[in-house]
Structures are given as structure tokens and as C-alpha cells.
Amino acid sequence: MHFAFVIDDYLPDSTRVGSKMLHELALEFINLGHKVTVITPNVNSKAAKLEVSELDGVNIWRFANGPVKDVAKIKRAINETLMSFNAWRTISSKVEKNTFDGVVYYSPSIFFGSFVNKIKKKCQCKSYLILRDLFPQWAIDAKMITEKSLITRYFRFFESLSYNAADSIGLMSKKNHQLFNTLHPQLKNTHVLFNWAAATPFGDQFVYESIRARLNLNDKVIFFYGGNIGHAQDMKNLLNLARGLKGFPKAHFLFIGQGDEVELIENLSKDWSLENVTILPSISQSEFKQVLSEVDVGLFSLAKHHTAHNFPGKILGYMVESLPILGSVNPNNDLQEIINAAEAGSVFINGEDEKLLCEAKKLLDDAQHRKQQGKAAYNLLKNVFSVEAATKLILKNLT
């Protein structure tokens, strides 16, 4: 069978977890004998023509579109709104009745609903929405927009279009599923689809210069955060943890990523004189995997005001490399129970600063503790968050 995968950002240039997850899913589909074509924007082209390429056996169709990542909010909203139009305008001549046997699309973005509906109508096939981001709900929670505003109504329209285009919707956790059903009780086609990753550690075949050697961190215990550095993550929370370990010479905090709060953490690091913090821009996926194999503890943070219960994809990368997980979540997020029950790390409610700092000190001082939790994290990945389990569930709903 031939499946279309739709996402707003994809490999090899993307550094985001979503693109990595979708690529691993595509490879598993291919491993089962299916064909996959990824349809994604090409932000480096203004010509309204299709760019075709291939990566690891995955076909990639790129359509010209303005950038939707790391640009001003208004510009991003305009460019995202145009994605469905630009995508269909570019690929419609290549889509026949039997071209695709199903569509898998990934959110964020919320703006692919119209495009997915056109493929479904032309090919008479089903669609599956991998819903990882309850936008605009989280923006309302963060008070970035108000519930009754005109811009919220605008986003709600496209959100509804995206959900209604799906025959099945997979949400990342039980609590997120419950919240979604409360917000959208009319939708009965939902279930839990955990995030996933291929359980293949990087190994020791380094291609790039060691991050420890490059930053002179060979004798340090590295607390690592990699991924989006934005409002939803409450990055000040992790900088505050670094400040709490300021007097511990073995501890070093490494942040690699991009987003709206990069400048914030750079300024805080300077204002608080945090010599135990290094902040670097995004790197390629292959280099990122190597970095994960060199660090000691995987960090994450979620803003306390969120009502959505996200499961950050970066955690899967930590699990692959058997890293203990240390982080903070919003209240009632079931990720806390999952990680803590498996003894794969320690997760606290955002604001429990002393507990977070106490566990960080324990991880700093006790290498055996780090090793035990890291091993449990890898086992949790294999047992619950495997790409094989995700593929099986999606195919069941599509076919």
C-alpha cells in the first residue's frame, strides 16, 4: 500500500523531534512492505513546482511555501494558512484515484485539514491525525491570546477543519486524551497514540568532534536539554536549576536548540553569571544523536499553566541512549507517573524547585544511580514507546 505522510518540517534539514519521529515511522512502514511519500513545504524555493527527492527509501515531495519555523508570529500564521493551498496546487496533477491508500498527517501544524480532505476525496482513502500539540489551547493557557479574540476564532476554525479531516486521531497520553474529549466531545474517533522512537543507540562510531572535548567538559556530569526553547517549555525553570548547582564544579548544563526563549536563557545565564551553562544553536540530527551518546542526564520542562498534558518527544532520544530523565511538568500530567513508576528518572510538578534540585544533586554525585535509571529508561522505551507499536496502531485504524 502507498501512504502519504504530511508534515510541515522534515529531514534531512530539520532538527525537530517531529520530523525525526515521522521518518522513523516511515521507515517502519517501508519495513512492513508499504510505500511512503512525505509531503512537506520547501521554504527555500519560491517557484511553484514540485521538488522530488528520496531519503532512506522514503519518497519526499516538497512544495514551495514561506517559512513556518523561527519567524515572526504574524508571518508564520500567514505562511501556515497558505500551506494547504500551496500543497494542493503543486501536487494535484500527480494525484490520481489510486495514488494513495491512506494519509497520515502530523500536528503541529493545524493548517493541513483542507489539503488532507482533497487527497481523501481524490483517492477515496482514510486519514490518521497524529496530534501532538493542542493549539491554540496552550496559547490561551499561556495568556498569549484570549479565548474570545478574533485571532483565536481564526485558529479554532482551522483547528476544527484539521480534526474533521481525520478518520482517526491519536493523542500522546491518557490525560491529553481525556482533555481533548472534554474540549471536543463531538469527536468520537480518538485514542491514545504514545510517542515513539527506534530503540537503536548511537554507539561509539563518532563522526563529529566530541562535544566534551570541544567544550572542555571531559570531567563534567552534563545535564542536557535539546530541542525547542520556547514559551511552552518554561526554560527559566531549567536555568534556575543550573543556578542551584552553581557551586558544584562537576555539574554542567548544555542547551542545544532554537525557539522564542533562546534570548531569555542567554540573558539569564549572563545576569546570573552561570559559568556552568553552555547554549548552542540547533545541529543536524546525526550530530544530535552523537551528543546524546556523550551526555549524562536528559532534562525537560513544561510550563505549569498548561492544561494540555504533553509528552515531549525529546524524552525518547534520552531513552534511546539510556539517560536518566529529570524534569518538571504541569499539574496532573500523567508523564510524571509513567517516568517515576518505571524508575526511569524523576519528574516533579513545575514549582517543586527544592525536590528538583535535590534529585539533580543525587544524579550528580551517584554514577550508579544514573546508570540504573538510564537502564530503566531504555526498557520503558522498548516496552511502551516503540515505533513498532505506533505503526501497528496507525495501520489498524487506516486499513
Image (cartoon, rainbow, N blue to C red):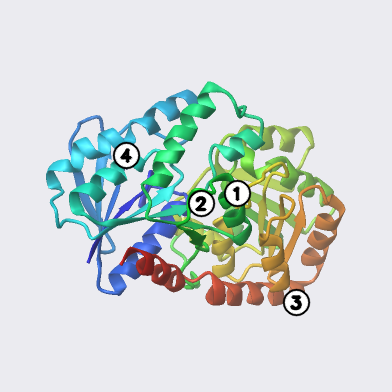
The residue at which mark 1 appears reads as 182
Q: Which mark is residue 114?
A: 4
What residue sits right under mark 3 in the picture?
Answer: 368
Separation of residues labelled 3 and 1 (CA atoms): 43 Å
Earlier sequence position, callout 2 versus callout 3 = 2
Q: What kind of residue is marked 3?
A: Gln
Classify mark 1: residues with Cα within 10 Å, few (<14), some (14-19) or many (20+). few
Residue 71: tell me if it is visible: no
Which residue occupies 45% across, 49% down? 15
Which residue is pictured at 74% across the width and 48% down the height? 276
Residue in the image at 62% along x and 27% along y: 146
Residue 104 circle label:
none
Please name whichever residue, 48 or 200, is drawn nearer the observer in this view of the structure: 48
Q: What distance separates the C-alpha of mark 2 from that of mark 3?
A: 34 Å
Q: Secondary structure at mark 3?
A: helix
What residue does disc 2 label?
132
* Residue type at numbered disc 1: Thr
Residues under numbered marks 2 and 1 in contact, where contact means CB atoms less than 8 Å apart = no
Q: Secondary structure at mark 2?
A: loop
Amino acid type shown at disc 2 = Arg
